[in-house]
């Protein structure tokens, strides 16, 4: 079956712009989590959605937001981009939360100039 | 809140030598623990996980990890390193709020 699909894979934005990233989970998976990966900081948890509801949220400013649709697809949005937002944004899906294994997409690499 | 500490951001071992990647965790409840691997330009893949039961967990590609509650550790080992093991490895913990928190990662270099 198809894996986790993230689009776009690469994008370049300038400071002040906004960006929307998309994630299509594995069929049947209802939980989608988002992580920001930067060198030296590893993966930092952004948020998790389950059945269209945000279940958990990390320590990121309100410029970072997300949502999940009824088909479990998820989007995350970053407004008023800053240089420090340059990172690999990883989406992961699982059947539910907690001990379930996360299946990751290949990521969306965002560069902010 | 749960947290993960991986000792050593870079580890180098010779091909054929023992691989040991260290992970210590903090959790207020019995944790679920994971090791993931990331190859260049790819997402993360699960190597192994511990939930309950046997404390020695075997994973893919010859890796294994042992849960030691008294030491709050979950170190990853492989008896004999292969060139294809070169990658970045992440330890992760899931706690009472079901968030899965990752360590900062250890990049494994294999020397010929």
Image (cartoon, helix red, strand yellow):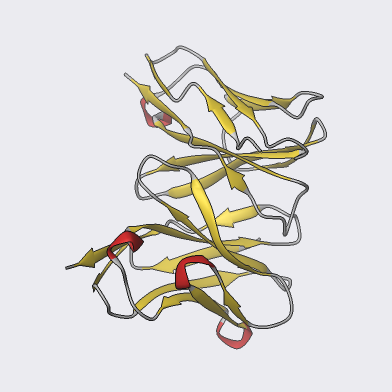
* Displayed quadrant of residue A71: top right
> For the view shown, which residue lies furthest in the front direction?
A1
> For the view shown, which residue lies furthest in the left direction?
B112
Q: Nearer the viewer, residue A73 or A68?
A: A73
Residue A43 screen position, x and y as percent? 49, 48
B90 sits left or right of A95 in the view = left
Residue at position x 48%, y 37% in the image? A106
Residue B86 screen position, x and y as percent? 31, 59
Q: How many marks?
A: 0
User: In the rendered image, is residue B74 in sight?
Assistant: no
Q: Nearer the viewer, residue B28 or B44?
A: B44
Residue B76 screen position, x and y as percent? 47, 74
A101 sits left or right of A61 in the view = right
Q: Is residue A61 above or below residue B60?
A: above
* Quarter of the picture holding the C terminus of chain A: top left
Residue at position x 61%, y 62% in the image? B93
Residue B41 screen position, x and y as percent? 38, 39
Residue at position x 66%, y 38% in the image? A1
Q: Is residue A103 above or below residue A26?
A: below
* Displayed quadrant of residue A64: top right
Residue at position x 56%, y 70% in the image? B25
* Displayed quadrant of residue A85: top left
A40 sits left or right of A91 in the view = left
Q: Nearer the viewer, residue A27 or A50?
A: A27
Q: Is residue B27 above or below residue A24?
A: below
User: In the rendered image, is residue B49 in sight?
Assistant: yes
């Amino acid at each position: 079956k198809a894996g986790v699909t993230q689009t776009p894979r690469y994008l370049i934005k300038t400071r002040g712009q906004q960006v929307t990233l998309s994630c299509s989970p594995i069929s049947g998976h209802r939980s989608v989590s988002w992580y920001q990966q930067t060198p030296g900081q590893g993966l930092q948890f952004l948020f998790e959605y389950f059945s269209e509801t945000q279940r958990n949220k990390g320590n990121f400013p309100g410029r970072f937001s997300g949502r999940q649709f009824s088909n479990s697809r998820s989007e995350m949005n970053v407004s008023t981009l800053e240089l420090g937002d340059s990172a690999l944004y990883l989406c992961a899906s699982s059947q539910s939360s907690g001990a379930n294994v996360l299946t990751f997409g290949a990521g969306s690499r965002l560069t902010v100039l | 809140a749960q947290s993960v500490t991986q000792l050593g951001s870079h580890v180098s071992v010779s091909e054929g030598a023992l691989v040991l990647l260290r992970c210590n965790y903090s959790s207020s409840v019995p944790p679920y623990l994971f090791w993931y691997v990331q190859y260049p330009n790819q997402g993360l893949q699960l190597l192994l996980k511990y939930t309950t039961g046997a404390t020695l967990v075997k994973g893919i590609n010859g890796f294994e990890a042992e849960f030691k509650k008294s030491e709050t550790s979950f170190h990853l080992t492989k008896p004999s390193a292969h060139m294809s093991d070169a990658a970045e490895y992440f330890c992760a913990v899931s706690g009472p709020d079901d968030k899965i928190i990752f360590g900062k990662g250890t990049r494994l270099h294999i020397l010929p």
